[in-house]
Amino acid sequence: MERIHTWYDVINSNENLMQGDLISDCPIIVPPSSIELDEMDVDIELYNVIIISQSCDLENKKIDLVLVCPFIPLDEFGTKGEKYNFYRSLKGKEALRRGDSPGYHLLNKCNIKGLYTDYLVVDFHNVYGVHFDLLMDIARKQEKRIRLLSPYREHLSQAFARFFMRVGLPADIPSFT
Amino acid sequence: MSNNNVLLQDHPKSIFANDRKINEDISEEDIMIAMQEHELIIRIIPVKKYKIRVKVKSIKKASPRVIEPEGIDGENTYLV
């Protein structure tokens, strides 16, 4: 019997948040450079994000702030602003696929009817903390959302950990070649 | 179950299948050299940006929220 490895599942809006849930249009408050007891303008940026916090912490409400990372479709990755974008090239895409760029993580296409996505690039360089209740509220307003399934969810988590724990050596051992 | 019985549904391995067979064509060394030549940090552009007006009512030092580990209740702890 053949087994099909599906990457995603469709989740109803009322289901609990879990690691690997994709949330659309999540508002991120950009911290101002200084804060005083006064009225002030604060920038809000909307990102499509994926939940990085551990599911058990979310399930048991052990955290107030949920760790999320923004993602973007591969075909839009780096299309604005840059003179030359390595990731638009075949070598760049291949680097993403192989996991050679530790700051980014490539997720598969989602072919679920009505929830189609291109390959998605998750950015680990910019992580955000979003209040649990706010994130739950946003999730409830989405009729359905996509959830990354195991083991791809753990693969994402491991990639994030690898990026976070990386060490730059001041002097590497010279190449043997 | 052998690997032959596992169907990979649109696995990223097939990401460039329509362009050309890249897996064999581009070596790990090629990628590393290209990565060293180019700026590799791409800032993801937000879907939307706007400003809101907020009133800062108070500024105070926060206290950490302590989460008790499960299964350790003080009396039955294994710590000596």
Image (tube, coloured by chain):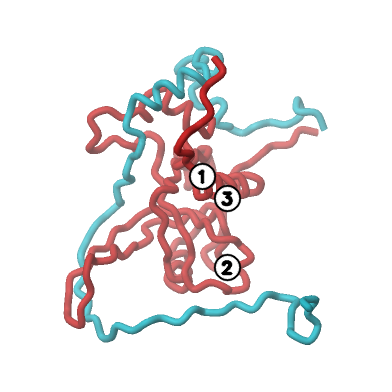
Chain colours: A red, B cyan
Cα distance, mark 3 to mark 2?
A: 15 Å
Q: Which mark sits nearer the N-terminus, 2 or 1?
A: 2
Badge 2 marks a residue whose secondary structure is: helix
Mark 2: give few (<14), some (14-19) or many (20+) Cα within 10 Å. some
Amino acid type at circle 1 is Arg
Cα distance, mark 1 to mark 3?
A: 14 Å
Q: Mark 3 lies on which chain?
A: A
Amino acid type at circle 3 is Ser
Q: Which chain carries label 2?
A: A
Q: Mark 1 lies on which chain?
A: A
Reading the image, the residue beneath label 1 is: A166
A65 or A120: nearer the viewer = A65
Where the N terminus of chain A falls, by quadrant? top right
Badge 1 marks a residue whose secondary structure is: loop
Q: Which mark is residue A58?
A: 2
Q: Nearer the viewer, mark 2 or mark 1?
A: 1
Q: Which mark is residue A157?
A: 3
Q: In this view, does A38 lie to the left or right of A90?
A: left
x%, y% of residue A160? 52, 48
Asked if badge 1 and badge 3 are on a common chain, one would say: yes
Q: Nearer the viewer, mark 1 or mark 3?
A: 1
Mark 1: give few (<14), some (14-19) or many (20+) Cα within 10 Å. few
Task: Classify A19 as above or below A85.
Answer: below
Q: Which mark sits nearer the N-terminus, 1 or 3?
A: 3
In the picture, residue A49 is in which quadrant? Answer: bottom left
